[in-house]
Image (cartoon, rainbow, N blue to C red):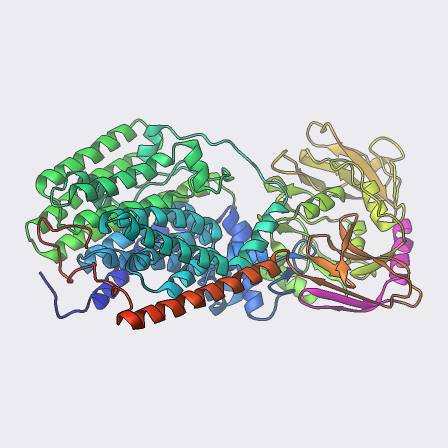
Amino acid sequence: MSTPHRSPRRLSLRGSALAALITVVAVCAGDAVARVFPYGHRHRSINDLGNQFVPFHAHLWDLLHGRARGGLLLNWQSGFGTSFLPDFGTYLSSPFAVLVALFPREDIDLAVYVVTVVKMAAAAAAMAWLLRTQRRGPWWAAGLLGASYALCGWSVIEASYNPMWLDGLIAFPLLCLTGEWALRGRRTALAASVVAVSWTANFYTAYMATLGAALVLLVRVVLTREGVRERSAVLVRGALTTLLGIALSAPVLIPLFLSSQQAYPGWSRQFEPVPWPDLFARILPATYSFSSPALFVGTGTLLLVAALPFQRAVPARTRLCWAGLTAAVLLSFQWTPTHLAWHVFATPNGSPYRQTFVLAGVAVIAAWTGLAAGPPRLRELAAGAAVLAAAAAAAAGSRLATAWGLGLFCGGLALAAAAWWSLRRRGPVLPAAGVLALVLIGQAAATTAFGHQGKLGGLDDYPSWGAAHAARSEALAGAEGWPAYRTDPGRPALTGNDPLLLGGEGGAYYSSHTPDVFTRTMVALGAGWTSRGRNVQSIDNPVTDALFAVGARLRPDGTIGRAQAVPPLVTIRPAGPAPSYGPFDGPPFANQELLLGAEVYEDPVAPGVCRAGTEAYLWAPEYNATARLADGRAFRLNGNAPRNRAALQPLGTSRGASSALVFDASAPPRWVLSCLDRARLEPAVAALRASAPTGLRVGSSTVSATLPPGTTGTAVLSSPAIAGWSCNGRPATPYLGLVSVPLAPGTTTLSCSFRPPGLAPGAAVAGAALLVLAGLLLAERRRGRRTGRGGIPDGAEAGAPVEFAPAGAGADGA
């Protein structure tokens, strides 16, 4: 039934709105069924969502409200001062991330959840808009297929707790849209801007989305343009706008790439394709696996894709191209060279199928291609259903297949087939569309809920903001003294990024960009880690507190422990060559003394016994149990190499022989007990304070101070010597892993600033891209004036807005 009185744009808006609505309903229903936050008592923040992403969004909230320590370039709160622009570009540069500022800070978990759902809805809307831009078809069907894309298994199971990946879900249809503009010779500036926003929002998934969009454009060019010259012109336009867009994002991308190269090495693994039964099992709803591609996209969509090769109303070349592209993308998941190509030539840690959303998008476009020629005939539906039944039969042998999944799949297949057949028979649209929507919502909600069950059963989870968070945050705020001294959230931590989540300026830090120099320095001084060195923990030790100007520390009981006066952020060390630490994996006690410049530890008076009055510290990095002094409380050490490393553990004040060291499990192969003498530590700290600069001033990415007359030696800033620091007009040099600069005779001031490596070249590249883009726009305008037209108008290939194309109509426009 045609609707000539309604504009194509209005109908496209309706389709996008329907897609977004269905997506929100399905996601929220699945979360409610699973009784996870915010609909129930179960935690939603599993794994990196609670450990990284929520704390980083909390820091963004602080930045937007003017409460953060640092700015866009430098984060003073984590890791004793670390580069922030790479973290921003990795986790927070999505246009949707700023929505967290609209919520109270204590509702940061809810804010991140809302951002996640809004991103899924945006992806659904973008896909629905793309479909109606590519070719004609009913707006409600575009809405259903757009929602099917946004509710794919990859989205609701994997990306839902990696919210920055959802920017790739949005990017794929938008980048395909830029391909449509290249096809029609329009909107060069807008296309480059879309690419720039996509790559800035999340370069990793944007890279995958760009590969997928390039494949889609290639098929569109083959099907809608003739001749090498015409086809090449489209591909060159598409490539040029893509390169310009990536260049515009260079001020974020180049620092991000350089930071990745300087990060502590993560875990590497060899790719192994999954068994084919497991692969087929993932097309079913209600399946979960962390190590196989979540292929579910809704049975109604899958039926259209499976029926496409048999649809005689669609030209044979069109069927071959779109069905072939869908199959080729699927097969690329199982071959190592193409697997590596999808993942920037490095098998990722964790989930190895992060490109799965591209397959979902290609499948949805293929389904729409067949639907553009009208619903499949009965024989075609039967053939498609037979293909899916064979896939389900192959999946039945997989341990991933569930009774619920098979039941939902078979029931949904029957209902979807009936609905599409009803539409083929010119039956009422509303009941059939309603059945298709309910099938999609039911299957997607079940997949969402089942995914929560799998994640909560196999991954760490972190509590949403509650009374414990509020109490710790208030205690830290009450002890705040920055920049005179740091306040550390302490151990045991709630997350790997407690300084960002709770406040303070601590040593804990967890990121994909954790600098190698920071991890190695902290390990040399006794820090523990998780995530194989990317999640570095704070050190609870008075020596390191003095070295890093930690004047207040949150204790496990929620109280604040205040140190005696600590040196400021900048101290002066003797002139001469910089010393070096002992072996990387050795005991930390001598390293601490080397950085402090004084001997403050002593050996036990007997094996496992410290002198009475001294403080016992145990270094046992591989120990995974409790240890204690015989007359004291037990302390848990979390050593599980190589993933976890136990931190240097304070055991309390020794009373002599009665305080012998006790391991509550088998003693580890490597351990050292050392005894801290406070009477030695206090004068060492006083000496550093006596020679320290005065008038210390700390900006968002700068440090300046006035030096006492006659000061000589080396000025040391108690922050890790990450690349990008310069002091007094020269690049900073490392001093036992910290920022330093030798002082020339007569120097009276110190001025240090931080600029992420790659920022200046990135800005230059972006500026050049803007100039090229301006030149292209000027040339297009002049060409348009000469020809009297500005290119092919949008929608010229889409045809009139009708419910379905007449039988036998071509599916690919011009």
Total number of numbered labels? 0
Q: Residue at x 48, y 65 (%)?
A: 770
Q: Position of residue 169 (x, y in %)?
A: 38, 52
Q: Position of residue 397 (x, y in %)?
A: 30, 26
Is residue 52 visible in this depiction of the protein?
A: yes
In-image side of 649 versus 46 (left or right): right
187 shown above or below 515: below
In-image side of 377 versus 730 (left or right): left
Quadrant of the rendered structure where residue 704 is? Answer: bottom right
Q: Which residues are magenta?
A: 678-707
**Residue 680 included in the magenta stretch of the image:** yes
Quadrant of image for the C terminus: bottom left
Q: Residue at x 72, y 52 (%)?
A: 720
Quadrant of image for the N terminus: bottom left
Residue closest to the eye, 539 or 700: 700
- Judged from this view, the residue extending furthest toward the front is 786
**Residue 753 included in the magenta stretch of the image:** no
Residue closest to the eye, 700 or 315: 315
- Judged from this view, the residue extending furthest toward the right is 710
Is residue 560 visible in this depiction of the protein?
A: no
123 shown above or below 376: below
In-image side of 123 versus 393 (left or right): right
Q: Position of residue 61 (x, y in %)?
A: 54, 65
Quadrant of the rendered structure where residue 383 is? Answer: top left
Residue closest to the eye, 255 or 702: 255
Quadrant of the rendered structure where residue 594 is? Answer: top right
530 shown above or below 2: above
Q: Position of residue 130 (x, y in %)?
A: 28, 57
